[in-house]
Image (tube, rainbow, N blue to C red):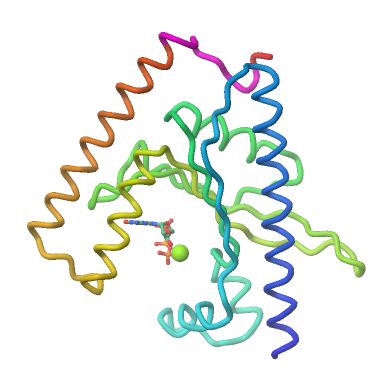
Amino acid sequence: MRDDFTRLIMEHQFAVDEILTKVSILRTEFLHLHRYNPIEHVSSRVKSPESILDKVSRRGLEPSLSAIKENITDIAGIRITCSFISDTYRVLEALTSQSDVRVIAMKDYIADPKPNGYRSLHAIVEIPVFLSTGPVPVTVEIQIRTIAMDFWASLEHKIFYKYDGDVPSHLATDLKNAATIAGSLDRQMEELHTEVHGATSLDDA
Ligand code: GTP
Ligand code: MG
């Protein structure tokens, strides 16, 4: 089991590396074509064995490798922070339309924010990782958001943990209001950006 776990983590790290390369190519190409960089920041992580096993027990899953592979889809995670809302959709499209990327699930929390105000695009994708023994499909969770969405989500995350998931209602209300303000800031920035740059797109080279 120990060796299997090491292999599982390693495969997910390779998948993260592959997606990071894809993101880096898109970023450089877009900059070359439009003299404009739609991606502000990229971060990634692979869940630790402890954190995978925590999630397994929280979900009441059997701690087998196959149950983990099938049910825990965020062992590998990539977060892409973009400047503007339109960029988040363009980056999502540019990644998920690639022929080696298979989309398993997609959630648009920008069009449909969570009740607490959380906004982001989420995609669960599968990509092949080519090992000496052949290709292995590996699942990666991709989160794409604007700077304002990221700012909000990181604060909400801290508050959520501080109160162990039981956020006092006045704070929840304030957070929700802040999410609305962040949303309107995003729309204002988008308008300004369109006025200055026009509607540049990844595909109108
Ligand atoms: P898990 O929460 O990972 O079990 O997944 P889920 O099935 O609820 O999927 P979802 O796509 O809603 O969330 C996946 C990830 O998105 C989370 O692990 C967080 O990183 C992020 N996320 C989702 N909702 C929130 C939220 O309300 N606040 C913050 N800060 N992050 C969120
Ligand atoms: Mg998660």
Which one is in front, 183 or 40? Answer: 40
Which residue does the image show at 71% across and 55% down from the upper left? 17
Which one is in front, 153 or 73? Answer: 153
Relative placement, left or right, of 65 versus 193 is right
Task: Give yes or no for residue 10 being in the magenta stretch.
Answer: no
Which residue does the image show at 43% across and 29% down from the upper left? 84
Q: Main secondary structure of the magenta part?
A: loop
* Placement of 119 over or under 47, stated as above or below: above
- Quarter holding residue 148: top left
Which residue does the image show at 68% across and 82% down from the upper left? 5
Q: Residue furthest left?
A: 170
Q: How many marks?
A: 0
Relative placement, left or right, of 127 versus 125 is right
Counting from the top left corner in percent of width and height, residue 121 is at 45, 43
Q: Quadrant of the N terminus?
A: bottom right
Counting from the top left corner in percent of width and height, residue 169 is at 9, 60
Relative placement, left or right, of 89 versus 159 is right
Q: Quadrant of the C terminus?
A: top right
Q: Give ligand 1's quarter of the image.
A: bottom left
Relative placement, left or right, of 18 versus 61 is right
* Placement of 1 over or under 104, stated as above or below: below
Image: magenta residue range? 195-203
Counting from the top left corner in percent of width and height, residue 4 is at 73, 84
Counting from the top left corner in percent of width and height, residue 29 is at 71, 27
